[in-house]
Image (cartoon, coloured by chain):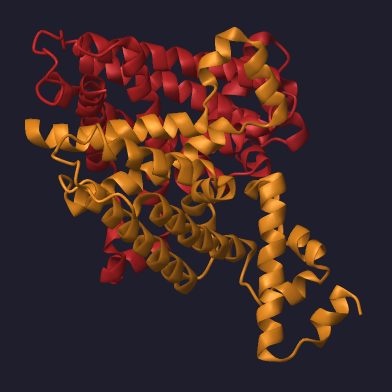
Chain colours: A orange, B red
Amino acid sequence: MTTAEAFQRARRPEQKVQRRDAILGAARELARRDGVRTVSLADIAAEVGIHKSALLRYFETREQIFLELTAEAWRDWAQALHAGLDAATGDTATGDTATGDAALVADVFARGFADRPLFCDLIAHTPLNLERNVSPEAVRRYKLTSLGVVDEAAALVQRALPALRMAEAREFVATLASLAGSLWQIANPAPALAELYASDPALAQACVDLAPRLRRTAEILLAGLIASRNQA
Amino acid sequence: MTTAEAFQRARRPEQKVQRRDAILGAARELARRDGVRTVSLADIAAEVGIHKSALLRYFETREQIFLELTAEAWRDWAQALHAGLDAATGDTATGDTATGDAALVADVFARGFADRPLFCDLIAHTPLNLERNVSPEAVRRYKLTSLGVVDEAAALVQRALPALRMAEAREFVATLASLAGSLWQIANPAPALAELYASDPALAQACVDLAPRLRRTAEILLAGLIASRNQA
């Protein structure tokens, strides 16, 4: 039995879940390989081995598929933060946020993004494209997931760095996530462009190395949240 | 004589410049009204009143048109920074970057972006789309402009806040520009989405007010650049 036949015959709830997972899996693999921007609904359908119309019984649009993958990526990223920060108790934090646990927080966040290229790519596409071509209900579900993870991440930051207020920790998380999306795009130019950057010294400044850049910006933000408050 | 006839008859260099300007002007107006993502080459050609093939004698792709507008927007933004910062002499800056001139720098940068919606929209599209569908030579020209303006803006920051090193001022400018692009997309959701955000208290946190958010992040970055250095 071919994949297409399996899809046509699937009627039971668990088979429908399998179809949905197969569609998400195909979109995930294509986006990882070619970048979110180039993957069409037809590409995903072809990869799964079904017709576009069959795929549209499971998802509203191409954008809804990617919005689901983004929600999944936020949850996976939260797990990585727990793994990196659950051991940090905040006992070295005394307002001096640029040392000790602040360096740990900056490193765990930077790696959390840099280790997840698809997540970074999706973050940039979310407000630009994904949220603009799905139903309000689909956006609402997505937003509740992403806002929930931002809160969860902020609570981890705040526990590691008790000198920060919860609102400040949330600002840190949201700002760094936005930056991860846009910096990933800059750090991953098309091949022809990467070659141009490498060969032309005048353009060297245009190159971005994602993990160190995010780590450094995270350190600046953490230090600045306290410093700007004290001096305000 | 209709616009289309004028275009067909244009042969002299100054007429070619006029054609080019008309194409850029049409793209600018459409993108301001409908957002960069929705404007196609066909839309621009229709607005100017010429055929797509005629338009392609002046620009490689839709993306090259928008990349030219982005370069133009960087230069216009630099003028606004000069207008806001040329009077700042840096005589209040003594390393205490969160007060005095730092507040002025943060405000001038935040307004420089928030007053230029098309510039912010274009910044988000640049690494994601625009730089990926033009010739290496077109990207190179664009990059030299944008890097030049980043340097010019960094020099203004550094003059107002002499405690900052030039490399730090450049980091500030580049980070805030990236954020302006992504935050503008979040701050300007599709109408249906804006309504959803406004009506659902659980989503209130998803709303972003661009100018105050950029001003606050600019203040945090300026304070953090100094604070993270001192504590390193």
Quarter of the picture holding the N terminus of chain A: bottom right
Residue that appears at 58% across and 38% down:
B128
Residue that appears at 58% across and 65% down:
A64
Residue that appears at 56% across and 19% down:
B142
Quarter of the picture holding the C terminus of chain A: top left
Q: Is residue B108 left or right of residue A175?
A: left
Residue nearer the viewer, B77 or B218: B218
Residue nearer the viewer, B113 or B54: B113
Residue nearer the viewer, B167 or B45: B167
Residue nearer the viewer, A29 or B162: A29
Percent across and percent down for residue A127 are: 46, 52
The count of marks equals 0
The image shows residue B217, relative to residue A200, as above or below, that is: below
Percent across and percent down for residue B217 are: 26, 36
Percent across and percent down for residue B82 are: 28, 14
Residue placed farthest to the bottom in the image? A12
* Any part of residue B209 in sight: no
The quarter holding residue B199 reads bottom left
The image shows residue A42, relative to residue B44, as above or below, that is: below
Percent across and percent down for residue A120 are: 52, 46
The quarter holding residue B78 reads top left
* Any part of residue B87 in sight: yes
Q: Is residue B21 left or right of residue A105?
A: right
